[in-house]
Image (spheres, grey):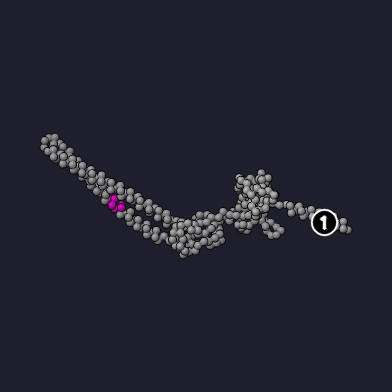
Amino acid sequence: MKLRYLFFILPLAFASCNNNGNKSDAYGNFEATEVIVSAQANGKLLTFNVDEGKLLKQGDLIGIIDTVDLSLKRQQLMSQKESMLSRLSNIHSQVEVFNQQKKNLSVDNDRIAKMFKDGAATKKQVDDIKGSMDVIDKQISSTETQSLTVEKDMKGIEKQIEQINESIHKSYIINDVNGTVLVKYTEPGEITAFGKSLYKIANLQDMILKVYVSGDQLAKVKIGIKCEVLVDKNTKENTKYEGIVEWVSDNAEFTPKIIQTKEERVNLVYAVKVKVKNDGTLKIGMPGEVNFK
């Protein structure tokens, strides 16, 4: 009886060993591309419609930073620009007057030159009219120089207005990526500054399982291939997902301490990123396994 009992238990033990040896090809943890959104302006945060766990879309207006000081500065610059435009208009009018005077003198010059030729005008009259024309030319040149100076100053004012408009635009906090808010760093009413972190967001709809494979496994791991991803459902069962390899490291690295590999004696491994569609159950840091087909 003892011999039969021993013979019966040996196959069970052998089968149990086979089940334990049926390991996945690679192990790792889920991660997501996290983006920390920072303020691009200084001032009081008037509104901030962000909560942890909230799903935000690209282009959503989620907050406004106080723009009163910027608006007042812009009004001041606009007034300066209007004053320069008025001054520029007066300068152009002066140039037109001088040009008309020059035109009249040119007619007088032709008349006196003809009279001088006929002996009806003196040399002094000829010199006087030419002198007057020279004065007009200098006045026109001087006035046109003033015009160029004002135009240059006005372009500087316009650049300042453009900068303020850009600063006002940046005071409107626009979400740039689709994703879920992971961490909220500030609250409405607080004073923020350029570069201060406002919130952290990540796209959790597509998760990345980062695993490590040994060199002898690398031949069957190629970018774009589909693979089986396993996540613990309970202590005995796994949930299966379909994954796609989207990145394979070019360089080997030492095995991370937290990672099991198919052959634990291998010291050098290659990092692999597998993209998995999230059904809402996958979380950042959750462990997972991969079987390459």
What's drawn in magenta, residue-wise?
A: 84-89
Q: Residue furthest right?
A: 1
User: Residue placed at 54% from the left, 60% from the top?
Assistant: 183
Q: Is residue 286 left or right of residue 148?
A: right
Q: Residue furthest left?
A: 120
Q: Residue furthest top?
A: 117
Coordinates of residue 257 in the picture (x, y in percent)? 65, 54
The rendered magenta stretch, by its main secondary structure, is classed as helix
User: Residue placed at 49% from the left, 55% from the top?
Assistant: 59
Question: Which of the image's four quarters has the N terminus?
Answer: bottom right
Residue under label 1: 9
Tally the marks: 1
User: Residue placed at 42% from the left, 57% from the top?
Assistant: 168
Coordinates of residue 226 in the picture (x, y in percent)? 64, 48
Q: Is residue 23 magenta?
A: no
Q: Is residue 262 left or right of residue 108?
A: right
- Judge whether residue 220 can be spotted in this image: no
Q: Amino acid at mark 1?
A: Ile
Q: Is residue 163 above or below residue 48?
A: above
Which of the 4 quarters of the picture holds residue 64? bottom left
Q: Secondary structure at mark 1?
A: helix
